Amino acid sequence: MSKPREDYEKTWWRRLERFVNGERIEVHEYHDIFEQNPSFLKEDIQKLDPVTPHKKKKAEWPERLETLKELYNRYEKWPETKGITIFKRIYGCMAVLFCLALITVLLFTVSNLPTFGSADNPASNEVVQRYIEEGLAETGAVNIVAGMILDYRAFDTLGESHVLFIAATCVMILLRADKQGKKHTTKRAPQTKPDPILKAAATLLAPFILIFGIYIVLNGHLSPGGGFSGGAIIGAGLILAANAFGFEQTGRFFTRKTYSSISLFALLFYSAAKSYSFYTGANHIESIIPKGTPGAILSSGLILPLNICVGMVVACTMYGFYSLFKKGEL
């Protein structure tokens, strides 16, 4: 393997490459190209006029040199003058064409949609009919929506839960405090003492908010609600408690380790449970998980524990976001 030249960075080809890549090139560097590398200029002149005597060609070098210098100077200034203008015009034209094409595709798609309420509407196909007619028997959930998102489309909900976890992890990487206690973000406002009115209101409301959120999670398979809505309520209760009593109080039971443990356990349990459920169903193997009596709190098979897992991930993510943006750590 050949070694690069020691003066590679000073060669005219390397400087031209830097210019094409958008790196800044000083004007004097173009002049150095011709003084330090006259060989390519000599070869160029020989190709243009091989009959002319060598002395005459050599006499034409200064004139030819000045011409090439002028061309290189124009080449350098082109992106800053005409180049930017031409690029903006091309960019504007392409943007308009792209928008017109997108509008045309959307209008064509809308024009081919079935009319609202028609029998061939995709919202009225056999899938919806299957959910309504067989959902209770197949999932055991009185709430058809819960049976759909946590049984028929459970892997889709698993992906949404992972999105929340990954988003919280990315925010934690960006906003957390490092080991030296320095923040990766700008300085925040100094912490003030909790407002006595807010503290009194939170003392009264926070327990009811948390209990109501737990109720929504546990009854998601029986009534409107579930893991997402219940977890959002629990997260709001935790945020209210942190605002009223400070992070020192909430930090006694919710830390970074708590967040990591709860999220990891919930996502792993969700993945393992639904993988088992889909494997047994796809291979016609009898599942040992009972569906229970419809309408009872302990029913609907795996939907209840999956609702709990989703609720824990959502609650931890909400409080984690607030804590990271407020103080830079969990």
Image: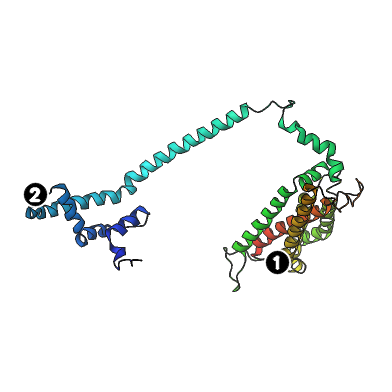
Is 312 placed above or below 284 here? below
Is 64 placed above or below 324 here? above
Residue 166, visible in the rendered structure: yes
Judge from the rendering whether residue 98 lies leftward or rightward of residue 24; answer left or right.
Answer: right
Q: Nearer the viewer, residue 96 or 147?
A: 147
CB contact under 8 Å: marks 2 and 1: no
Q: Which mark is residue 256?
A: 1
**Secondary element at image label 1:** helix
Which residue is depicted at the point 73% across and 60% down?
263
**Secondary element at image label 2:** loop
How far, Cα to Cα, is label 2 from label 1? 82 Å
Residue 246, visible in the rendered structure: no
Q: Position of residue 140 (x, y in %)?
A: 87, 45
Reading the image, the residue beneath label 2 is 52
Q: Amino acid at mark 2?
A: Thr
Choose top left, top right, bottom left or bottom right for residue 136: top right
Q: Position of residue 326 (x, y in %)?
A: 66, 62
Q: Position of residue 327 (x, y in %)?
A: 65, 64
Which residue is depicted at the point 87% across and 42% down?
137
Q: Position of residue 201 (x, y in %)?
A: 80, 58
